[in-house]
Image (cartoon, rainbow, N blue to C red):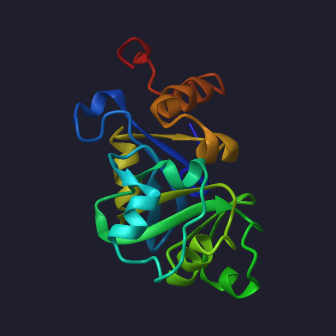
Amino acid sequence: MMSLERLAPGLLLAAPRLGDPHFERTVVLLGKHDSEGALGWVLNGQEVMQVSELFTEAELVPHNLVLPVGPRFSAMARVGGPVAGDSGWLIYRRGESQQAELREHEVAIGEELVASGAVEAFDALMRGQGPAEFRVLLGYAGWGPGQLDSELQAGAWLPAPLDAAEALDGVLEDLWESAYRRTIGTGPGAFSGERGSA
């Protein structure tokens, strides 16, 4: 199992033994974990609506602007966590923002990924000046000081290494399974005796 001090960046996989259908096979992208608490985003949360539809319904699209067309805009925005459900977040590769001034709004998630909830980032995206590959999430997951550590010690979550390509481009319905299999193959102790219940 990964050291509690080195959880972020990484993934948190809901433990099979948790038994809560609301969290079944939940995968959290953990961006921050320190003495002040932890911050992350559920990657495979409940679908909300298509990204382009969400931008239009939320009245984010300026008049006379035609949204870019592509698979990322027709993909589904998802619930990113139970905190601030009306906040929007973009997850994308570091360095893909074409506007340098937007980088000050980014939350680094390791060497490869960033998250941004800035209105300016969404505006750039809709104008075709944002990242080519991204996920749109509503809300986030947050833990107070020591809270996540307690949940981990209680066996609620399995820390897993972050694969940036899988987190950004993987099939979300398969994400828990693939991350779990990759994790239990990296060392002993992860959910020992639980393989059959996954």
Image side of residue 114 versus residue 195, left or right: right
**Residue found at x 52% / y 34%:** 175
**Residue found at x 36% / y 77%:** 59
Seen from this angle, which residue lies furthest front?
64
Image side of residue 197 versus residue 114, left or right: left
Please tell me in which quadrant of the rendered image residue 154 appears.
Answer: top left
Q: Position of residue 112 (x, y in %)?
A: 73, 57
Q: Nearer the viewer, residue 90 or 62?
A: 62
Residue 84 seen anywhere in this rendered image of the structure: yes
Q: Position of residue 196 (x, y in %)?
A: 39, 11
Q: Position of residue 47 (x, y in %)?
A: 35, 47
* Relative vertical location of residue 180 with respect to residue 118 in this rendering, above or below: above
Residue 139 seen anywhere in this rendered image of the structure: no
**Residue found at x 63% / y 26%:** 187
- Quadrant location of the C terminus in the rendered image: top left
**Residue found at x 30% / y 28%:** 17
- Quadrant location of the N terminus in the rendered image: top right
Number of callouts: 0
Image side of residue 1 versus residue 139, left or right: right
Q: Nearer the viewer, residue 148 or 24?
A: 24
